[in-house]
Image: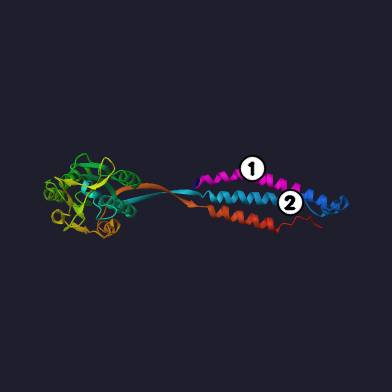
Amino acid sequence: MNLGNDRALWLLFTIPVVLLPAYVWCFWRKAKVLRVLASNEMLKKINTSVSLKKQVFKAFLLIAAFVTIVAALTEPKWNPQAQKIKRAGRDVVILLDTSRSMLAEDIKPSRLERSKIAVRDLLERLTGDRIAIVTFAGNATVKCPLTQDYAFVRMVLADISTESTSRGGTMIGDAIRKATEEVFDRQSREYKDIILITDGEDHDSFPVQAAEKAATEGIRIIAIGLGDEAEGSRIPITEPDGRQTFLKYEGAEVWSKLDADTLRKVVYATDSGKYLSVEPGTTLDLGEIYTRLIDSAEKRELESVTMMKYDEKFQIFLALGIGLILCEALISERKKA
């Protein structure tokens, strides 16, 4: 037998701690009240028509009903049968830009924070796919290898900030090469996707050439560009004295603009690549993007898990408990005439 909820067994301790003392108190209280309301001669006449054995038996039936209902709550099951469950999915690597330009607030609350919220939403939609996270700025770092442990991915995601990479800059090409060479396996040329989330301001890392190399490995790139192409946005920073200001270069404020042209070239270098723009005032819905572009695509078998399937039998104990309660209600406390 297998119990699906063995914690319910703790309820059985209420029998010696609560139920039995309650019954003893009720019998004592009843006798005490009768002695107050009736004389000894009257009590003798009353007691001749009431069966103490039946009263005890009725109490026993209710306690037995309680036990069987607790047994039902433990979700008993038996007759185990081996069942093989196959998991199918794709390998998805999130390339997340953590350069300082991602602090721009043209997309609320900031480009980076909105991206992290979108990735968390994506995790709610995943249906067996393996996912990895690579952060990049001046260099690229594998923060999470390919895994189906989405709780671990969430934990990693929570710690990502603009401090996640040690060098400034935006090296999109290095991030693509890192995913191609160190994250994806070489067992298959299919079922591989990169979701690139960035403002597209690359610093001579040759991202198009990196995308072409990824395409030879069967990798598709879906690029999501954050920000405004025309006007751009300033980058907020906090001074050592706590004062809020904006990033400056050679005395002038830096305005970060979306480089959509580079991202389009990157995705067009891969088969079925897709570019999506997220402008100020719009939302980034990675869950919808996943459903439309990835979940509907062809998948491979990632693993087979053998699990034991049991027949649920709680109904037996529940029916027995209800039957005992009905019996208790039908039994009279009085002696047979």
Judge from the rendering whether residue 185 lies leftward or rightward of residue 21; answer left or right: left
Label tally:
2
Kindly state the secondary structure of the residue where label 2 is placed. helix
Q: Quadrant of residue 298?
A: bottom left
Reply yes or no: does residue 23 show up in magenta: yes
Judge from the rendering whether residue 201 lies leftward or rightward of residue 237; answer left or right: left
Residue wearing tag 2? 55
Q: Earlier in the sequence, mark 2 or mark 1?
A: 1
Residue wearing tag 1? 17
- What secondary structure characterizes most of the magenta part? helix
Which quadrant would the C terminus be assigned to in this image?
Answer: bottom right
Of the pair 78 and 93, the residue shown nearer to us: 93
Q: Position of residue 110 (x, y in %)?
A: 27, 52
User: Which residue is located at x 24 percent, y 42 percent?
Assistant: 142
Marks 2/1: CA distance?
20 Å
Of the pair 320 and 191, the residue shown nearer to us: 191
Going by the numbered disc 2, the residue's amino acid type is: Gln
Q: Is residue 127 visible?
A: no
Q: Position of residue 249 (x, y in %)?
A: 15, 45
User: Which residue is located at x 65 percent, y 58 percent?
Assistant: 326
Quick one: label 2, few (<14), some, or many (20+) residues within 10 Å? some
Quick one: label 1, few (<14), some, or many (20+) residues within 10 Å? few
Going by the numbered disc 1, the residue's amino acid type is: Val
Colouring rule applied to residues: rainbow
Judge from the rendering whether residue 82 lies leftward or rightward of residue 127; answer left or right: right
Q: Position of residue 133 (x, y in %)?
A: 26, 46
For the magenta stretch, what is the residue range?
5-29
Kindly state the secondary structure of the residue where label 1 is placed. helix
Reply yes or no: does residue 140 show up in magenta: no
Of the pair 38 and 245, the residue shown nearer to us: 245
